[in-house]
Amino acid sequence: MPMSVSFIPKEDRLDLSFDGNLDLTVANDLCELIPRIDDNLKTCIVDLSRVERVFDSGIALLRMLSGGLARVGATLVVLSDHPDVQRRMPLFLGNASCLSPQDAQATLRSA
């Protein structure tokens, strides 16, 4: 499965995890998910640590997701060491931040 979704109601957090290519193969799933984003959502964590290749279509889908999250005031956190993702982060809009998976683990341990 190229995309896994889990919601943690206690934290008002949506977790998305992608495997393989970040491209149009996840378009249907994301296009169905974005309109259903709850107004109470605070954070969306997108784990791209298992993404092998990043395509422009995948970046466009992340931008759509970021727009949907901005609509409800939620923060987008992208976990990725992938150079293409880090280089293209400004395209995701202003409500996104990018952490390497190792930085995220260190942050969680210190909290």
Image (spheres, grey):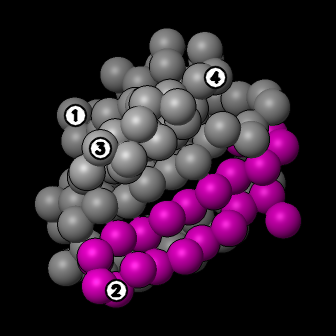
Q: Are marks 2 and 1 in contact (CB under 8 Å)?
A: no
Residue 9: numbered disc: 2
- At which x and y percent is residue 105? 47, 42
Q: Disc 1 marks which residue?
A: 94
Vertical comparison of 64 with 30: above or below: above
Q: Is residue 105 visible?
A: yes
**What residue do we see at 43% from left, 30% from top?**
103
Depth check, front residue: 66 or 106: 106
Q: Earlier in the sequence, mark 3 or mark 1?
A: 1
Q: Earlier in the sequence, mark 3 or mark 2?
A: 2
- At which x and y percent is residue 63? 43, 42
Q: Earlier in the sequence, mark 4 or mark 1?
A: 4
Find the distance from the CA under tag 2 to the CA under tag 4: 29 Å
**Horizontal side of residue 96 vs 80, given as left or right:** left
The residues colored magenta run 1-22
- The kind of secondary structure element at disc 4 is loop
Q: Earlier in the sequence, mark 2 or mark 1?
A: 2
For residue 56, which quarter of the picture? top right
